[in-house]
Amino acid sequence: MKPDPNAVDGTYFIRSLYFDTPTDTALREKLDGVNRREKFRIRYYNHDTAVIHLEKKSKLSGLGNKQSAPLTARQAQQIVDGDLEWMLSSPHGLIRELYAKMQTRQLKPKTIVDYTREPFVYGPGNVRVTIDYDIRTGLGCTDFLDPNCPTIPAGDAPIILEVKWDGFLPDIIRDAVQLEGRRVSAFSKYAQCRIYG
């Protein structure tokens, strides 16, 4: 495998802002293993707020899907501040969908999730192997564009080795990630970052 060309010195920093309902629907569905679920987040990389994306991750029967739409830093801040009417006229369906769910399901920014990622890529199968560590939570802070927003370690968060692929997983990669004494399991950084509330 080769390091992801988007990494800087082999890693990049990820900051996400996750949304949830007042009754923590996304968190509960993840913890309860609900078969069909979704969650929304806003994300940027390497402290660069010039490129921000709204993302919706969906799961159905263990298969994942991710949709994305671009946001400006101003638009991201407007969402955090609850200034939402502009979303109705967005050309991006995902932004309009978030608006609808913020109105009907009362989705709101819930917590910041920060971590460092070491990514690797492998052409056949479009494989990405990532090692995520130093997972930190913003607790109740949702002003994710503020570089001074305090974060703390998210409990005893493990180091996460994740393997993603499109058409197939080559045997050479499958064999390489079989680590002795380790098992495959589900892990949610969002759920881990809600450990304190």
Image (cartoon, rainbow, N blue to C red):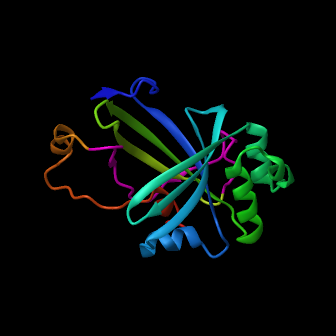
Asked if residue 28 is positioned above or below residue 186 in the image, the reply reads below
Q: Please tell me in which quadrant of the rendered image residue 106 appears.
A: bottom right
| Residue at position x 34%, y 54% in the image | 158
Q: Quadrant of the C terminus?
A: bottom right
Q: How many marks?
A: 0
Give the residue drawn at x 46%, y 56%: 189
Point 69% across, 65% down: residue: 107
Examine the structure image and report whether residue 161 is included in the region drawn in magenta.
Answer: yes
> Is 44 positioned to the left or the right of 35 in the image?
right
Among all residues in the image, which is located at the extreme front?
A: 167
Whether residue 197 appears in this view of the structure is no
Is residue 150 rendered magenta in the image?
Answer: yes
Q: Nearer the viewer, residue 139 or 191?
A: 191
Q: Which residues are magenta?
A: 141-168
Q: Depth check: 147 or 11 in front? A: 11
Say left or right for 182 vs 114.
left
Q: Quadrant of residue 7?
A: top left
Residue 56 image point, x, y percent: 58, 54
Return the x and y of residue 8 as percentages of the image width and height. Answer: 46, 24
Q: Residue at x 80, y 53 (%)?
A: 81
Q: Position of residue 10 (x, y in %)?
A: 39, 27
Identify the image quadrant of the N terminus. Answer: top left
Magenta segment, principal secondary structure? loop
Where residue 65 sits: x, y (%)? 48, 53
- Residue 150 visible in this rendered orientation of the protein: yes
